[in-house]
Amino acid sequence: MQNIKNYIIISCLILSYTNSLAQTLSLDNVLATIKTNNPQLKMYDTDIQSMDAAAKGAKSWMAPQVSTGFYMAPYNTQLWKVSEMGPGMGNYMIGVTQMIPNQSKLKADFNYMNAMSSVEVENKNYTINQLNALAKSNYYQWIILDKKLKVANDNLLLLDYMIKSMEIRYQYNMDKLPTYYKAKSQYSVLQSMIVMLENDITQKRVMLNTLMARDKNTIFDIDTSYQIKDFDFIKSDTTAFAKNRSDVKAIDKTILLNQMKIETEKKKLLPEFGIKYDHMFAFGEQPQQFSLMLMVNIPFAPWSSKMNKANINSFQIKNESLNWQKQMVLNEAVGMITGMNAELQNVKKQYDITTNNIIPSLKKNYDTAVIAWQNNTGDLFVVLDAWEALNMAQMDALDKLQSILNIQVEIEKQLETK
């Protein structure tokens, strides 16, 4: 028996020590860790590095061409040699060809490839905003769950006190048995709620660990402080939204990228020059010979420029579509923020009424019922009804607070602010 007691004491000490070592993470700590460790963001980083690395080769020239073989040599090999008929015929030739690209075309290609990663940068920022919103939502839900858990535990102590008091008073016929069983059932309901709340907190911890790319079972606590923000100052100005939203910036960068692609297609219509040099090793007693020729590509010919002109037209139409997409995104964002802000103000008013008026009144009602019961002038059934009404109002207030924080997170997500 003594060993069992020692084991229980040691287990409690270990559990207490473990809990004391649990790290407390603020919301900023969580968001910073997500930005550093989340594998989805690391994927964007490597894609951006890959595009930047590819852009370094944009100004490369075409590879030179080397040719070799017989040139103007007769099939009769006897004629290659010096004879009475002549000094010999035929040559063995070595040739080199090098095309010289148009510098403006190389510059246009480089500008296009160098700007490709800018779209991925904005896509990464958009993903960061989405992950931040998900993290804040789970973090705030954890805060509310923690507050609900505290209310439930406090109410559990109150019910335990009532049940023990009823057990004593029932012996003296001072309380009714149905009321006792009602209190016991409420006690069990609260125990079940506490188990559910603790499980929900565990799920939030796992989700945040997942977003931070840590061991899913890592134990940590959160800072339960929060701030209710005011968004009344926000004006329905699409220009201001466009400056903050990464998805809109990504559209702008894509439009700019398409414009650069149009420039590269235009530069492809410019002529390109090349040099071809051939050296002939003559057979017999013929003198050695060479050939030096200048070459030019004529891509602007009507039959060779159709594809480039079609591509230019295609990218111009795409940019028109992207501009409409940008207007659609901004229009939806303004509408959502305006509607959510109105809903936020409404829920805030409900929350203030609940916390400032309803809960204090129900608390006084409960205190009055308890005093009357303790003085044997009231019924415990009335106390339980008063307690149940107070408990429901407290939970309702926390639900409204959760709604406020959820709407706040969604507005910050639309505005792309921390």
Image (tube, rainbow, N blue to C red):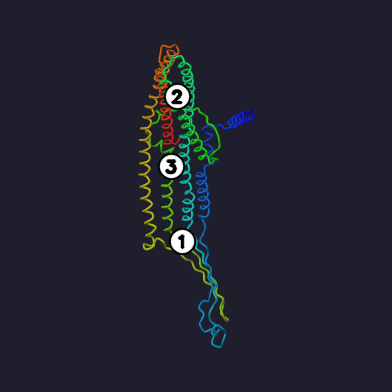
Residues 413 and 192: in front is: 192
Viewer-nearest of discs 3 and 1: 3
Quarter of the view holding residue 282: bottom right
Q: Tell me how far mark 3 sits from mark 1, CA to CA.
A: 36 Å
Viewer-nearest of discs 2 and 1: 2
**Three-letter residue code for mark 2:** Lys
Q: Disc 3 or 1, which lies upstream in sequence?
A: 3
What residue did someone put label 3 on? Answer: 249
The secondary element bearing badge 3 is classed as helix
- Residue 179, placed above or below residue 246: above
What residue did someone put label 1 on? Answer: 272
Q: Tell me how far mark 2 sits from mark 1, CA to CA.
A: 92 Å
Neighbor class of circle 2 (other Cα within 10 Å; few <14, some 14-19, many 20+) is some
Residue 11 locus on image (x, y percent): 60, 31
**Three-letter residue code for mark 3:** Lys
What residue did someone put label 2 on? Answer: 184
Residue at 51% x, 82% y is 75
Instruction: Tell me the tag on residue 327.
Output: none
Q: Tell me how far mark 2 sits from mark 3, CA to CA.
A: 60 Å
Quarter of the picture containing the N terminus is top right
Residues 390 and 71: in front is: 390
